[in-house]
Image (spheres, helix red, strand yellow):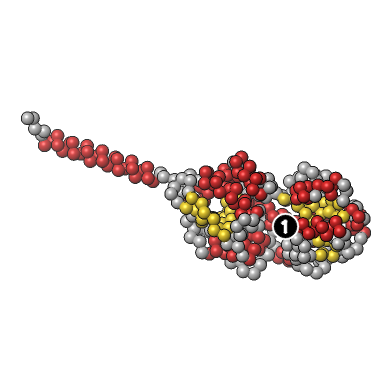
Amino acid sequence: MKRNKPGHALAAGLILSAGLALVLSTADSALSQAPFYQGKTITLIQATSPGGTSDMMVKAAVPYLKKHIPGEPTLVSEYMPGAGGIKAVNHIYKNVRPDGLTIGNVGGGLVSNAVLGEAGVLYDINKLIYLGSPHSHYHWVFMTRRESGLVNLDALRSASGVRIGAQAVGHSVYIVGRIFAYLMGLKEPKFVVGYGGTELDLALVRGELDGRINNADTLLKRNPEWLAKGVVDVHAIMEVPKGAKHSHFAKLPEVEDFAKSERERKLLTMLRAFRQVGSPYILPPGTPKEPVKILQEAVAKTFNDPGFHSEYKKLTGDEATPLMPDAMEKAIKELPRDAEIVGLFKKIAAAGPLPPR
């Protein structure tokens, strides 16, 4: 039998060792290239209760977020309602580990509560990380009952004590109604609160109210006969964002047309920004760049996915109008925050007479 020489054995051993090292190195490389979120679970903290419209927005997005996040992690929802969203945002800001495994979904109060200095706010909107929102467009219209005789702007401005309905002091319908009345120059309007949304419709028809604010699409879906039969007169519209025309009400004057000063235009910019941020997805400060980039890209792909738009429409009844992360950051950065505008907004949002112009 022919024996291997010692040199041959050494060479064979070196080759074997090199091969083993290559295999191990390749395995390590493959492991290092595994998607960040592979095999992981993301917790979605929602500042709402299950079953509402906000929950439906998230439910529409979850399958597509999973699809577009490399590694397809598991997504689970945790509900944390309370204090108009303040409870959830405070928790995300102060208590959540910034590892990219917890995302918040909260209402537009995230921004307004901070800017207006509401009690209990413990977070800084400049330090939160934004992933975008599924809706950013909105249209409010101001209408009056035809039988009230307030058929045009001249009639509105000539009348005194026009009764305008809303749900409660501080509700968005109340605030926007007050801003319309303030900018259109109504004389000592009276704001009547304590109604639900559909109750406002009944009160208007019964003559308990002269006017109200409503979402333009809601008016078209819920009360199309009012427009067809001339039950109401629609006087003006607010576009969010400015320039986003509504196909049915494109010829109405935009509420900013009535503004007389830069102060009043800033007031509208503030209100639009509060509404435009919609229901943002957020991350806590300090989240590393890698998961931030992954999640921002996944949210953008979700919002551009036709399947998401179809599911959103099915679950909420509305069209998705996404706001991408960079646009959200820009809106928040440019939001007026000077004390004069904040003070004016607070006076309009409160009870009592409107402030002088």
Q: Quadrant of the C terminus?
A: bottom right
Image location (x, y in percent) of residue 243: 75, 46
Residue at 14% of width from left, 34% of height from top?
A: 8
Q: Quadrant of residue 120?
A: bottom right
Q: Is residue 214 left or right of residue 90?
A: right
Image location (x, y in percent) of residue 219: 78, 50
Residue at 86% of width from left, 52% of height from top?
A: 232
In the displayed orientation, state which residue is furthest to the top: 1
Image location (x, y in percent) of residue 61: 58, 48
Is residue 329 visible from the viewing direction of this image?
no
Q: Is residue 234 above or below residue 304?
A: below
| Nearer the observer, 259 or 67 | 67
Q: Is residue 177 left or right of residue 4?
A: right
Residue at 46% of width from left, 49% of height from top?
A: 37
**In the structure shown, which secondary structural element does the residue marked by tag 1 occupy?**
helix
| Nearer the observer, 217 or 207 | 207
Q: Quadrant of residue 24?
A: top left
Residue at 41% of width from left, 45% of height from top?
A: 34
Q: Quadrant of residue 86?
A: bottom right
Image location (x, y in percent) of residue 132: 60, 50
Q: Quadrant of the N terminus?
A: top left
Is residue 199 visible from the viewing direction of this image?
yes
In the displayed orientation, state which residue is furthest to the left: 1
Q: Is residue 138 above or below residue 199?
A: above
Disc 1: which residue: 271
Q: Identity of the amino acid at label 1?
A: Leu
